[in-house]
Image (cartoon, rainbow, N blue to C red):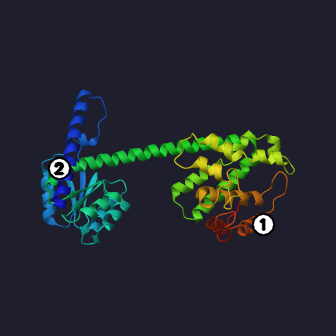
């Protein structure tokens, strides 16, 4: 009973797709000059069919035979044969049975998308394979079809919608890439602003950025997280544009009022950045990069898990660079002293895993500023 209910809901969904298609076509009729997706045109669709059951393959061919756009269908009974075909040929979509002689379960969809990530894939599932088909969709397939059900008659439309959704994904990814480039450009422009104000701070940010990136890679963080850490590091001291240059470059120890003014720079940086909708917590990283695990940092005295991981990484990179490099009021102490300091304060001021990764970067990877 539950199986029939699921199949019925799938048919209803396809029916609404059909109604939506009619509405779109009506809009097209009233605006012929508008660009229209390929799936509403007479363009030929090349299809790769991966199916080991010859009866099912014949049924699928019959369902597509009446549609003049599906005239080029290539058939393979093994996943390895299909992957070999994809080496030299391009297809608009693929129909995939998850149970093939040389591949079983989700391995098939993973292998197929590994070879052709942009290929729209529709899963061909048996009556008892609904759950694994839905999992395949979560892993990158565009849709699934229960072969021995009434929804098989909607196959041409399912294929077209899978193609259109995949195309929409590609366009969205292009937009996100463009947005990321724009945001990266914005960050670089901000970094140049700091450089014009104080060349020392600019050099400090550049060296700290490279080290933070190396630490994050050593920790094997996701590439997107690493990108956010890198961008935040590039402008982590942007709040210093509010501090007089003579204080930043003062060749002696700062007075208490002067140091208190310098300590405002994370909050000033946060105020500058907080309204920019970055896809990473840039403003929060900048705000927290002087916080310490024991609550002795600033501006808010955050502790332990109150500090985000990205800020913990930047904190270690920041202090190592500061100790190892020349400061306006003292000569450089060197990298050995910097490593000794973060080792001594591992788990007290600085995150243990971050410190361990930083030490590994220098001692095992032979990192140099």
Please indicate whether residue 247 sits to the left or right of residue 352 in the image: right
Q: Residues within 10 Å of mark 1 (few under 14, many from 20)?
A: some
Q: As drawn, which residue projects farthest toward the top?
A: 30
Q: Earlier in the sequence, mark 1 or mark 2?
A: 2
Looking at the image, residue 95 lies above or below residue 267 = below
Residue density around tag 2, few if under 14, some if 14–19, many if 20 or more, within 10 Å: some
Question: What label sits on residue 151 in the rendered view?
Answer: none
Q: 77 or 306: nearer the eye?
A: 306
The quadrant of the picture occupied by the N terminus is bottom left
Residue 217 figure quarter: bottom right
Question: At numbered mark 1, what does the secondary structure look like: helix, strand or loop?
Answer: helix
Residue 45 visible in the snapshot: no
Q: Number of marks in the image?
A: 2
Residue beneath the point at 55% across and 43% down: 183
Relative image position of residue 214 (x, y in whole percent): 62, 61
Residue 94 in sight: yes
Q: Is residue 89 left or right of residue 347?
A: left
Give the residue pinned by disc 1: 337
Residue 306 drawn at (x, y percent): 60, 57
Circle 2 sits on which residue?
A: 154
Image position of 327 with respect to 361: above or below: above
């Amino acid at each position: 009973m539950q199986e029939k209910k699921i199949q019925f809901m799938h048919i209803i969904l396809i029916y609404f797709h059909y109604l939506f298609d009619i509405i779109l076509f009506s809009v097209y009729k009233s605006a012929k000059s508008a660009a229209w997706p390929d799936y509403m045109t007479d363009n030929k669709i090349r299809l790769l069919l991966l199916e080991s059951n010859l009866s099912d393959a014949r049924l699928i061919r019959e369902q597509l035979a009446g549609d003049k756009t599906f005239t080029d269908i290539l058939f393979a009974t093994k996943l390895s044969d299909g992957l070999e075909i994809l080496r030299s040929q391009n297809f608009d979509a693929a129909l995939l049975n998850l149970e093939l002689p040389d591949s079983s379960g989700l391995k098939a969809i993973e292998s197929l998308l590994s070879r052709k990530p942009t290929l729209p894939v529709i899963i061909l599932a048996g009556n008892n394979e609904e759950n694994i088909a839905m999992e395949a969709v979560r892993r990158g397939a565009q849709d699934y079809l229960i072969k021995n059900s009434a929804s098989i008659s909607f196959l041409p439309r399912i294929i077209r919608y899978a193609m259109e959704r995949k195309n929409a994904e590609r366009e969205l990814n292009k937009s996100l890439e463009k947005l990321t480039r724009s945001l990266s450009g914005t960050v670089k422009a901000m970094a140049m602003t700091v450089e014009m104000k104080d060349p020392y701070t600019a050099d400090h940010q550049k060296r700290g950025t490279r080290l933070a990136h190396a630490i994050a890679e050593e920790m094997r963080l996701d590439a997107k997280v690493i990108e956010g850490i890198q961008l935040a590091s590039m402008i982590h001291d942007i709040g210093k544009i509010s501090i007089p240059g003579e204080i930043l470059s003062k060749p002696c120890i700062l007075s208490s009022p002067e140091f208190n003014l310098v300590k405002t720079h994370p909050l000033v940086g946060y105020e500058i950045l907080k309204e920019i909708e970055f896809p990473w917590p840039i403003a929060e990283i900048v705000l927290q990069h002087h916080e310490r695990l024991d609550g002795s940092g600033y501006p808010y005295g955050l502790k332990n898990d109150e500090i985000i991981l990205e800020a913990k990484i930047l904190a270690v990179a920041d202090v190592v660079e500061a100790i190892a490099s020349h400061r306006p009021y003292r000569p450089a102490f060197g990298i050995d002293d910097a490593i000794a300091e973060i080792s001594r304060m591992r788990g007290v001021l600085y995150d243990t895993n971050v410190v361990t990764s930083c030490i590994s970067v220098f001692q095992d990877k032979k990192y140099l500023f």
